[in-house]
Image (tube, rainbow, N blue to C red):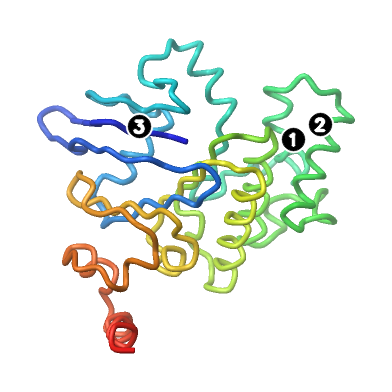
């Protein structure tokens, strides 16, 4: 579980995050949503330590990440997995070598153990047979699955995903969503996903945080969104006419 308490972040005289208080739960897909420029990316960067809050706390199972020493933060990051918007694979490494990379850096396993762990992770994302290919030889959806395999190779407690469906077609996006959801449940991870994808919000949004102009405007489960009376949330979610019609159909039976 990750608790955020009274988090503020300013750049010079511009306050970007304002008194954010929330909880990201274990074993659930926690989604951060909001318009471009709302502060959601800044929030995630504060959570993982790429930025330091102006004030406030980020508690990893009671441990204040903000107050940790540099050495403690390095150790803490070994409990984190990251999936980047672009997949961020190493083009010069094979799929297997990409997944092995965190193991090579941070584990004490033998080479054979690292190879086996990487193959186990590739099997978990249904990529057995692709281990000797290079990123340029596989599709964007497969690259994202390699990134997921790499992110879970060290069996992290916390998984952070920045726009994991960016650039993917709807069918592939659904595969990635279902994979992230099932892995989160299987390993009881605290998964936090930054997304613009409304299909993800409605499909796997077990805990949704809506950021508006730097503050937490709304928090709930996806099932509550259809009936929400928060105008800022509904204006954001139901921006298209089709979604508005779907919402009205649900509300009127």
> What separation in Å lies between label 2 and label 3 (alpha carbons)?
31 Å
Q: Which residue is drawn at 38% across and 33% down?
A: 3
Quarter location, residue 2: top left
Give the percent coordinates (x, y) of residue 160. Answer: 49, 42
- Relative placement, left or right, of 38 versus 153 is left
SS state under label 3: helix
Q: Are marks 2 and 3 in contact (CB under 8 Å)?
A: no
Residue 46's label in the rendered image is 3
Between 182 and 139, the one lying in front of the other is 182
Q: How far apart are marks 3 and 1 (CA)?
A: 27 Å
When the figure is inspected, residue 114 is found, relative to residue 222, above or below; the finding is above
Taking the spot 73% from the left edge, 22% from the top edge, the residue there is 107
Q: Where is residue 209 in the image (x, y as percent from the top left)?
A: 33, 51
Judging from the image, what secondary structure is the residue with disc 2 in?
Answer: helix
Mark toward the start of the polypeptide (1 vs 2) = 1
Tell me if mark 3 has few (under 14), some (14-19) or many (20+) residues whose alpha carbon lies within 10 angstroms of its own. many
Q: Could you tell me which quadrant the C terminus lies in?
A: bottom left
- Which residue is pictured at 19% across the width and 35% down the height? 19
Task: Point out the residue furthest to the left here.
Answer: 13
Quadrant of residue 201 in the image? bottom left
Write the residue at 20% across / 44% down. Answer: 214
Q: In this view, does 189 lie to the left or right of 247?
A: right
Q: Where is residue 54 in the image (x, y as percent from the top left)?
A: 22, 24
Along the polypeptide, which appears first: circle 2 or circle 3?
3
Residue 100, numbered label: 1
How many marks are shown on the rendered structure?
3
Local crowd size for mark 1, using a 10 Å CA cut-off: few (<14), some (14–19), many (≥20): many
Q: Do the residues labelled 1 and 2 touch (CB within 8 Å)?
A: yes
Q: Mark 2 points at which residue?
A: 114
- In terms of sequence position, does the residue under pointer 3 or pointer 1 come before the other? 3
User: Residue 68: x and y, percent?
Assistant: 42, 14
CA–CA distance between discs 1 and 2?
6 Å
């Amino acid at each position: 579980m990750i608790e955020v308490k009274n988090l503020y972040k300013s750049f010079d005289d511009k306050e970007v995050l304002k008194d954010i208080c929330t909880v990201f739960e274990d074993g659930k897909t926690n989604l951060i949503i909001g318009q471009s420029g709302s502060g959601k990316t800044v929030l995630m960067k504060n959570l993982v330590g790429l930025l330091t809050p102006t004030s406030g706390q980020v508690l990893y199972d009671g441990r204040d990440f903000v107050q940790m020493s540099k050495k403690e933060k390095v150790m803490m990051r070994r409990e984190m997995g990251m999936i980047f918007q672009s997949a961020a694979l190493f083009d010069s490494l094979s799929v297997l070598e990409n997944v092995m990379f965190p193991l090579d850096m941070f584990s004490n396993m033998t080479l054979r153990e690292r190879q086996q762990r990487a193959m186990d992770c590739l099997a978990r994302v249904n990529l057995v047979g692709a281990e000797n290919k290079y990123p340029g030889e596989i599709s964007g959806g497969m690259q994202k699955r390699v990134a997921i395999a790499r992110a879970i190779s060290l069996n992290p407690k916390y998984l952070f995903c920045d726009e994991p469906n960016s650039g993917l077609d709807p069918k592939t996006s659904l595969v990635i969503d279902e994979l992230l959801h099932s892995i989160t449940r299987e390993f009881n991870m605290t998964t936090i996903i930054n997304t613009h994808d409304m299909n993800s919000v409605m499909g796997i949004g077990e805990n949704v945080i809506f950021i508006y102009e730097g503050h937490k405007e709304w928090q709930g489960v996806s099932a509550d969104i259809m009936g929400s009376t928060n105008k800022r949330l509904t204006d954001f979610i139901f921006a298209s006419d089709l979604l508005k019609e779907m919402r009205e159909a649900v509300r009127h039976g």
